[in-house]
Amino acid sequence: MNFEDHLKIADMDFLKYIKDITLITMTLFVVIDIVGSIPVILDLKKKAGALQAGKAAWAAGIIMILFVFFGEGMLHYIGISVNAFAVAGALVIFFFAMEMILGIQLFRDEQPETASIVPLAFPLIAGAGSLTTILSLRSQYSLACVIIGIVLNLLLVYVVIKKASAIERLIGKNGLSVLRRIFGIILLAIAIQMITTNLKTLL
């Protein structure tokens, strides 16, 4: 194999990594739904006076990355396969998508009352949906790609929390509603793809 062939393979691998990271980042972005959570963030900001975006992002990141490394081991310990968990997680994502598209509320019935790391980082950012999604993604993509996707989302989360008021003024309530439904359709398609991919392995 000559040098040019090696370059072609390297380019193909690089493009695959970029594609995987993009899909992971988009999936987590839609599941976390930090843009759709702007009204909640603004409400927390009014109650507390200020939000610590850096601390919230760090706390959520620690929870997510710990789940990447230890979540699979925990599942094996209790006798559940990663693919079975991935299907279960994809079903959760499916219902999240339906909630976003139809404008109904299936999750988050209780709003957090205080703006601290616990309600903001968990469960608003690193909630059940994002954690199950991380394990579902981990069953299909490399560890490095999943971690990069998490880090990119945490950067977006930090920016959105810091600029929540400005984003709401810029997009408007109608704009946020439209974005939520668009992301919901994308998320629905991703959930169906994850279910079909993992069901093949299980069956």
Image (cartoon, rainbow, N blue to C red):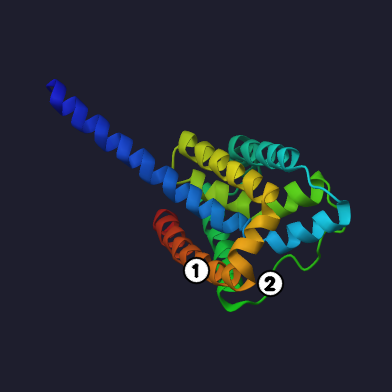
Q: Which residue is mark 2?
A: 106
Q: Which residue bears the numbered disc 1?
A: 182
The picture quadrant where one finds residue 35 is bottom right
Q: Is residue 65 above or below residue 109?
A: above
Q: Residues within 10 Å of mark 2 (few under 14, many from 20)?
A: few
Give whichever of discs 2 and 1 has the lower sequence position.
2
Q: Which quadrant of the figure has residue 4?
A: top left
Residue drawn at the location 58% of the way across and 57% of the way down: 31
Left or right of 74? Residue 40 is right
Using the rendered view, name the quadrant where residue 7 is placed: top left
Residue 128 appears in the rendering: yes
Residue type, mark 2 in image: Leu
Residue 140: percent from left, percent from top: 44, 46
Percent across and percent down for residue 37 are: 68, 60
Q: Secondary structure at mark 1?
A: helix
Can residue 36 be seen from the camera position used here?
no
